[in-house]
Image: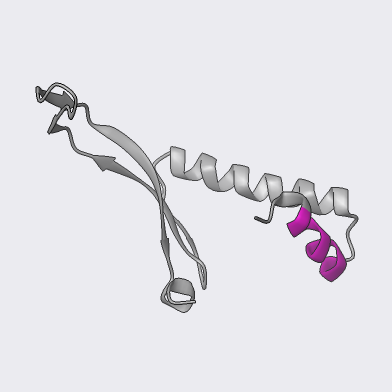
């Protein structure tokens, strides 16, 4: 798995920034995506995909241990839909 530190190395090399500065830029970018989506905005990055918040409706489910029917509350989910360019990599 690749983390922000590993991503920062090639970004720093390509941009001429230090690795520390590249990490700061990557973190700020990710924080801004999360903040925009949290405000209800869709964030579309061409060639990458769309980040958005979706609502999963309340539904009835069966508890597998007891067999009893339960209601799961509505919840908001952070989703990512990849662009066609990367969907089938």
Count of numbered badges drawn on the protein: 0
Query: Residue 33: x and y, percent?
Result: 55, 48
| Lateral position of residue 82 relative to residue 18, left or right | left
**Which residue corresponds to the image point at 77% horizontal and 46% vertical from the top-left?**
24
Task: Answer above or below: position of 29 versus 10.
Answer: above
* Dominant SS in magenta: helix
| 64 vs 14, nearest the viewer | 64
| Lateral position of residue 9 relative to residue 75, left or right | right
Residue 80 sits in which quadrant? bottom left
**Which residue corresponds to the image point at 83% horizontal and 70% vertical from the top-left?**
14
**Which residue corresponds to the image point at 49% horizontal and 74% vertical from the top-left?**
86
**Which residue corresponds to the image point at 41% horizontal and 76% vertical from the top-left?**
84
Query: Residue 2: x and y, percent?
Result: 68, 56
| Lateral position of residue 30 relative to residue 42, left or right | right
Query: Residue 73: x and y, percent?
Result: 21, 27
Task: Answer above or below: position of 52 versus 70.
Answer: below
Q: Which residues fall within the magenta stretch? A: 6-15
């Amino acid at each position: 798995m690749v983390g922000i530190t590993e991503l920062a190395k090639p970004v720093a090399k390509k941009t001429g920034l230090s690795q520390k500065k590249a990490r700061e830029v990557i973190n700020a970018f990710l924080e801004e995506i999360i903040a925009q989506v949290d405000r209800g905005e869709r964030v579309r990055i061409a060639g990458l995909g769309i980040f958005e918040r979706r609502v999963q409706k309340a539904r009835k489910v069966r508890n597998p241990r007891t067999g009893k029917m339960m209601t799961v509350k509505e919840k908001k989910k952070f989703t990512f839909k990849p662009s066609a360019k990367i969907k089938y990599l």
